[in-house]
Image (spheres, grey):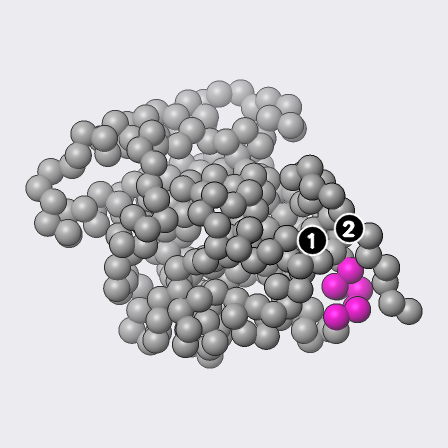
Amino acid sequence: MSSDSNHHFSQSHMYASLTAYLQDLQESGIDGIPLEAEVAAASAGTAAMRASAAPQGKEGDRYEHLSAPEVHETLEQIRKNLGACQRCKLGATRKNLVFGVGNPKARLVFVGEGPGADEDAQGEPFVGDAGKMLNRIIAAMELKREDVYICNVVKCRPPQNRPPEADEVTTCSPFLLRQLASIKPEVIVALGTSAAHALLQTKVPISKMRGKFHDFHGMPLMPTYHPSYLLRTGGNSDSFWSVWDDMTQVLRLLKLPVPDKIRKK
């Protein structure tokens, strides 16, 4: 992805997030826009325009965080703003909205594509068989589920677990951006093709994207295979060890110890 297209994506999603936020304030019956929100919107818009106009630096500069609004939102505030969301057609078919779970100050965030049947039933991401595989990966990293944050691109289950459609991603992604802005993780892991494509705005196969970091709004993002794919291919498969290679890069970037793992014959 070119630097120009990446900055254009950052600007458009930033404006989409701000627009959705301000519209929700109006729908909630708030008369006028708080001064803090006006300042945040102005500073964010100015930063985006400056980022677009500024010359690009060296490769290492890509991971400097994009200027964020000065007013910090908590995850609780974002969840409250999301409400009983009916902003896209997924709201009509879900059982439970699945916002996210984990440490609100996590250094590492895992992002999947959307809830499945177990997640829809329980209202928590990655609690089914794929969730057990993700827990296994997190444990192999010598981390705990409560150390990280786990969420999805869309917050409601797509029917028959189909991939989220473009309009659904566009509608829901401002809330994901606000979650990430609130947490301020040092690394993001995109789990699977749909999540990586939605976040990075690309159609490159996951097999070609994984194994190296990509820039997402100034944050390093590692695409890797979805845990459900590992379930289909087996726990000692080439794909499993590819994911482990990706996670060792994540651990090194976080300056955490990399546990020794020996592949079974």
> Is residue 221 shown to the viewer in this render?
yes
Which of the pair 136/229 is nearer the observer? Answer: 136
Q: Is residue 70 magenta?
A: no
- The residue where tag 2 is placed is 259
Magenta range:
235-241
Horizontal side, residue 222 vs residue 71: left or right: right
Residue 141 badge: 1
Q: Look at the image and tell me in which quarter the C terminus lies.
A: bottom right
Whether residue 77 is situated above or below residue 64 in the rendered picture: below
Q: Quadrant of residue 110?
A: bottom right
Say which amino acid is labelled 1.
Met
Question: What residue lies at 27% left-to-right and 54% top-to-bottom?
Answer: 80
**SS type, badge 1:** loop
Give x and y (percent) for residue 179: 41, 47
- The answer to whether mark 2 and mark 1 are in CB contact below 8 A is yes
Horizontal side, residue 243 vs residue 190: left or right: right
Which of the pair 82/251 is nearer the observer? Answer: 251
Say which amino acid is labelled 2.
Pro
Which of the pair 178/60 is nearer the observer? Answer: 178
Question: What residue lies at 69% left-to-right and 53% top-to-bottom?
Answer: 141
Give x and y (percent) for residue 86: 26, 65
